[in-house]
Amino acid sequence: ETGVTQSPTHLIKTRGQQVTLRCSSQSGHNTVSWYQQALGQGPQFIFQYYREEENGRGNFPPRFSGLQFPNYSSELNVNALELDDSALYLCASSLAGGNEQFFGPGTRLTVL
Amino acid sequence: GENVEQHPSTLSVQEGDSAVIKCTYSDSASNYFPWYKQELGKRPQLIIDIRSNVGEKKDQRIAVTLNKTAKHFSLHITETQPEDSAVYFCAAPKGGNTPLVFGKGTRLSVIA
């Protein structure tokens, strides 16, 4: 059984640029959720994907978008980056209808 | 929607003493309450969880208690060790299902 993986581990961008983060879910898990964790804060829910469709969204603007692929892996895209987007981005996989979520190692995004 | 509050924000204990972290939630439909441990620079790791049909669950030195009437749940760590030092997050499901709404975290320091 493989765990949740994310790439890249670190990323530095400048304001206004676009970024794509990637996540591979744990073996057997078909649901992926993305969270943003600012320094010193708890993770904040961005959105969730199930069967390649968005299945719930938190309080984030439309410039945060995502995809899920047939193999359940997922991407998080952020357009028009702002300084406040600097954070650790975590994805978590779970089974549909299940509660347990298992997190990947995260991508540390720095926006200059 | 769900609102989760966590106390205290920081906690220092002597090695061997017990530590208790408390959380309250707002959505009476929530039925799953996990606790995550996050070490510096690492992913949140699920350490214990409890469902609403039980009042207490133990796993070695860690226990979680749930009071559904009062809408609060607590993490208890006994015989604390230096490696227990980390940030601990409680969470509850948004809308009674995944994804999760997290508390702001408790930084636990175990002093040898």
Image: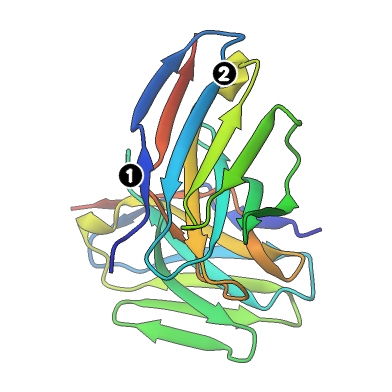
- Residue position marked by numbered label 1 in the rendering: B42
- The residue lying toward the viewer, choosing from B70 and A18, is A18
Pointer 1: residues within 10 angstroms few (<14), some, or many (20+)? few
**Which is in the foreground here, disc 1 or disc 2?**
2
**SS at mark 1?**
loop
In the depicted structure, whether residue A23 falls above or below residue B75: above
Q: Position of residue B10 (x, y in %)?
A: 47, 46
Q: Residue B67 carries which label?
A: none
Can residue A36 be seen here? The reply is: yes
Quadrant assignment, res B41: top left
On screen, residue B39 versus residue A41, left or right, reads: left
In the depicted structure, whether residue B16 falls above or below residue A40: below
On screen, residue A46 versus residue A41, left or right, reads: right
Give me the C-alpha separation between circle 1 and circle 2.
Answer: 25 Å
Q: Where is residue B109 in the image (x, y as percent from the top left)?
A: 33, 49
**SS at mark 2?**
loop
Q: Where is residue B21 in the image (x, y as percent from the top left)?
A: 50, 63
In the depicted structure, whether residue B85 falls above or below residue A20: below
- The residue lying toward the viewer, choosing from A15 and B15, is A15
- The residue lying toward the viewer, choosing from A95 and B60, is A95
What amino acid is found at the position of numbered circle 2 in the picture?
A: Gln
- Identify which residue is drawn at 60% across, 80% down: B66
- Residue position marked by numbered label 2 in the rendering: A18
**Which quarter of the rendered picture does the N terminus of chain B lie within?**
bottom right
